[in-house]
Image (cartoon, helix red, strand yellow):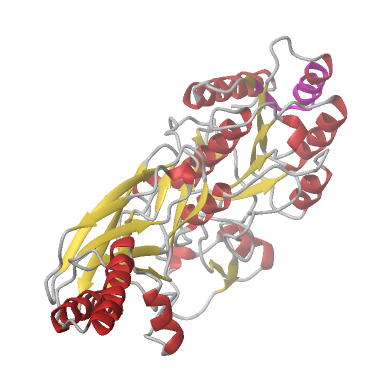
Amino acid sequence: MTRPGDPAGAGGSAARGRRAGPPDDAGPPAGGGLRQAFGGLTTRGRSFLAAGAAACVCAYLLGQSDLLRVGLLMAVLPLVCVLVLFRVRHQVTGGRSLAPSRVEAMSQARVSLRLENVSRLPTGLLMLQDQVPYVLGPRPRFVLDRVEAGGTREVSYRVRSDLRGRYELGPLQLRLTDPFGMCELTRSFGDADTLTVVPRVDPLPPVGLAGRAAGRGESRDRSLALSGEDDVIPRGYRHGDDLRRVHWRSTARYGQLMVRREEQPQRSYCTVLLDTRRGAYPGAGPDSAFEWAVSGAASVAVHLMERGLAARLLTDDGAGAPGRDSGPDGWSGADRPEATGTLLEALAVVDHSGNTGFTRAREALRDHPGGLLVAFVGEVAAEDAEVLARMRHRTAGAVAFVLDGRDDGADGARAGIDVLRGAGWTVLLVRPGDELADLWRQADRAHRQAADQKGFV
């Protein structure tokens, strides 16, 4: 399926369409298919067939030729309708197009159905029915009066889901009826499409949390999420090199003329940690704390990637991107095509884990560059907070959105928050329904205040 381009970072704008492939009952197989077709006789067709047979028997016994002709007509008519409808059924093609094929939760997608009669005979009454998961809405049904030979019909419907995930649409079912109502046959087209519902992405303000912060004096701008790639790699001077590329410090160090081999832009990194522990989140459903955390992780990751950072999704079980990796090194950025879409599709299917701590996540973070760490965690106990606290030493900055699912707050959760703050984390206690944009600004202000107290900018 053509994957969701991504308007506003959430869903593809290009429609996807194709003619359905071989049907489940494809090809007019010899005996078995025809016997199955005769099984499509309606009550009216069976009544005509029985009445015709009875009339023929009575005509034979009574010697009434007129009654025999009536009986033959009544008996043959349902049989002819079955044969004609059986032939027409295999000369009607159907297809489906889905636009977009990826949408945000609580957004709609349009499904278009196209039916084409490629036979030389017109069809009778048709009913189209598409198989749709119940979470996307009621099963759509359309009644078409008649399709002429070579004609086409197009109908459409909309689907919407409040729950993220991957949902299969299809197969498309077509029910054909002859003009006399003697027979009804069903054809199923085997092709199906997949609708991906990704978590909602909220726009975030461009704060200095992961952006450029001005230095003092003659120092250059620095980034909170910077991970130490040198921007100067000197090499020996070669004939024809531009003298403006001479690196005088390296020249004095090595005793020969050195030039900058290349100037590599400093690369900024960010790790978005999503806590998926089942016991950390009370409740379920689209308004639950866990869904808020998934939406928050998607919003932060997309925001940072749009600002040019290389982002990495990490869960408590140490998985870099559940289901699909964004790249060979686990990082996604503006230089990777479809990076945002890949990350959102991974979050579309992320589910609760059976883990009880963050040990695997800490081990996974140890082998990657530091940079900024943004965590969305549920209720965290003191022992779990100690593991997260040790993760702070591997990063240039750490922000934790700790979800409080209880009204009174637990003493263990409060102790865990104190542990995180004592280790240098910027911690915000939030509840489902809070605006992430406001929390993002609060996190930036809190981090700046903590940095000023330590003498940093």
- Residue 26 located left or right of residue 198: left
Q: Position of residue 134 (x, y in %)?
A: 48, 45
Whether residue 417 is in magenta: the answer is yes
Position of 255 relative to 285 (above/below): below
Q: Position of residue 95 (x, y in %)?
A: 30, 67
**Residue pictured at 75% horizontal, 43% vertical:** 394
Q: Position of residue 56 (x, y in %)?
A: 26, 80
Q: From which residue to which does the magenta span run? A: 414-428
Q: Position of residue 383 (x, y in %)?
A: 88, 30
- Quadrant location, the C terminus: top right
> Is residue 361 visible from the viewing direction of this image?
yes
Whether residue 75 is in magenta: the answer is no
**Foreground: 249 or 390?**
390
- Residue 337 located left or right of residue 273: left
Position of 103 relative to 56 (above/below): above
- Residue 358 located left or right of residue 76: right
- Residue 176 located left or right of residue 342: left
Q: Main secondary structure of the magenta part?
A: helix
**Foreground: 402 or 125?**
125
Q: Residue furthest front?
A: 62
Position of 297 relative to 230 (above/below): above
